Image (spheres, coloured by chain):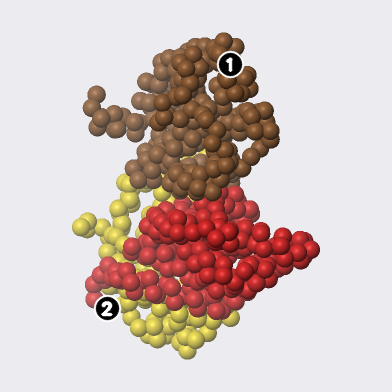
Amino acid sequence: MSEFLLTTTELSCERDGRLLFSDLHITLSAGECLQVMGPNGSGKSTLLRCVAGLFPDFDGSVEAEPALYLGHKLGISLLLSVEENLRWYQGLAGQASPVTEVLERVGMAGYERVVCQRLSAGQQRRVGLARLLICNSPLWLLDEPLTALDEAGHELVTGLITDHLASGGGAFCATHQPLSVPQAGTLELDMSH
Amino acid sequence: MTLKTLWHRLGSPRWFYQISRPWIYVLGILALVLLVTGTVWGLVFAPMDYQQHDSFRIMYVHVPAAMVAQSAYIVMGFAGVLLLVWRMKLADMVLATVVPFGMSMTLLALVTGAVWGKPTWGAWWVWDARTTSMLVLLFLYFGLYALRQAIARPEAAARACAVLAVVGMINIPIIKYSVNFALTLHQKASFTLTEAPSMPPEMWLPLALNVLGIYCLFGANLLSRLRLEILRRERGTQWVRDLVLSGSA
Amino acid sequence: MGMIAAPTATSAPRLFWSQFQRELVSVVRSKEEALNPLLFLFLAISLFALGAGGDPEVLQNIAPAIIWVLVLLANMMSLEGLFRRDYEDGTLEQLILLAQPGFVPVLAKIAAQWCVSGLAMTLLAPIAGLILFLPSTVLPTLMITLLLGTPALSLLGAVGAALTVGLRRGGVLLAILVLPLYVPVLIFGSSAVIQHMDGIGTQAQIYWLMAITMISITLAPFLVHAALKISVEQ
């Protein structure tokens, strides 16, 4: 059991003939938040996917605790209702909190029976965020968590991350704009490679 | 060298690149010698067949092509397993390089089979067990080729082809059984590995030479393409740069 | 909120039923996806009947082949959507990341797909047989072979669907990949019905179909899972 939630050693990745990043040494401890910043195409998403285990063609090594990954895609089925989606996540990865509580926290209270197709983009994102609370996981990997969210949504994300850090979790986020999470470390990826 | 060290060494494309060079010449020359001898002997000098007269001579091309076409797919099936289970880099490259050879051999077998069939059975094509399983093999090769073309990243394409090759390899015996079951119309005598050949040595020896020769050709072709693929994949590494700059690739 | 523990694993049977339920609910919510292949099946059968001039003798002889081939094609149409929706909305990559063991929900998806295609076609087969003048004594053989053969079609086809889910124009590619693999099932299924019409016993084919399905159930889920992992990389 490592003391770190996430450790990468000499992590480098090439995609489409371009070297995205090389020789990355990252450690993330409990209670830490690290944000990866850089312009479009700088490899932030690829880095996150390498860490999550979705992209296997990298050099170097990654050691990570079981993580929850929020990617570009919503991660919820639009055919199902909000509650059905969250119950599916419960079936996959266990249950940390009851559905009603979670929905209240993300500002979607009362929407249990609504089919996700009927929700707006921002609301769908909130339901997607809800799974962070439904499933227990020490490490969160968030790719552009502020997408499609309004001011209140930004505050929600910041609040969720802060609470998560306070209870000993860690967050590794790729983002355009800095998150207002206190004491968040920053890793810059640029295109100079 | 023990099997274990061989296994480890095979995981290194660089080592393979270095030791494979002499083998290409060995196999290439063997292939040339065997194939020329076998083909000339079979097409010109071997005695005429009692029933089929001269038309059976196409067998000297058809049978080796068919055998190596099937073996090539099995090689890919095993390479697929090596890639998926043990992530062996070399297996990745084998999958990339065998398909064209296998596909051309299958086509050759089908065409020569038709050429053989016309005088023997009176039709260019019949749906009997062997021809049908060769046709299905061709479709399986097409599938591998199409899948590789459809996926942009070579590493992902190789892995996808690995899965397909494994599925295909497992299916091949089942396909053969099913086709034998339903379509055995023609019990034409031919060369099988398990039965003692009912042909005199002057007839099956050139065949054996051609079979060996074509496997040597397969080996030489595979090795040379593999070396090219290694250079391509490893072009970012120092040893490849040194090799190319010193002009001795 | 105390210290955060690792995600708790769910038992395999519960994982299966949770996924299976989800699939059936999805089917109910988008009925056209499930119905279209079945409609295609009957439309195509009608076209064959019309093309043969409605001649009972001609149709009776080729009915087993027609029905089996169209079952293959309709099943393939149904497979295209097996993973596509989940791929596009991101739930597929979540399934790959979170499900332990990974092949269980995959098997559940395939099982649900079989229910709305293979199983449905088995139940509708008598109608197809009657339209094509198959003698009614042969219908049980038709249904049994379909019942035993269609699971293999769904399982093998799922491998193809998993490999092509992220690709553009994956539909045609799916056909190229999967139809050669379908050949044994087609041969055994069709020849069983034909031989029954000729009065010959069909036990061999039945056993073969069962064997193929057994092998597929054992191997396909892992291969499908591996293929999904590859597709999700894109």
**Residue at left offset 30%, top offset 71%:** C11
Q: Residues within 10 Å of mark 2 (few under 14, many from 20)?
A: few
Res B164 seen here: no
Residue closest to the eye, C195 or C44: C195
At which x and y percent is residue B148? Answer: 55, 43
User: Mark 2 highlights which residue?
Assistant: C1
User: Mark 1 highlights which residue?
Assistant: B48
Q: How many marks?
A: 2
In the rendered image, the residue lying farthest to the right is C53
**Residue at left offset 55%, top offset 21%:** B60
Question: Comparing marks 1 and 2, which lies closer to the viewer?
Answer: 1
Name the subunit of mark 2: C
Secondary element at image label 2: loop
In the rendered image, the residue lying farthest to the front is C199
**Residue at left offset 68%, top offset 33%:** B122
Kind of residue sitting beneath label 2: Met
Q: The red chain is which one?
A: C
At which x and y percent is residue B38? Answer: 52, 15
At which x and y percent is residue A78? Answer: 54, 74
Eyeballing the image, is B194 above or below B81?
above
- Judged left or right of residue C133, residue C188 is left
Same chain shared by disc 1 and disc 2: no
**Residue at left offset 41%, top offset 29%:** B195
Colour of chain A as rendered: yellow
Q: Which chain is brown?
A: B
Question: Gap in Å between the C-alphas at discs 1 and 2?
Answer: 90 Å
Eyeballing the image, is B20 above or below A184?
above
Kind of residue sitting beneath label 1: Met
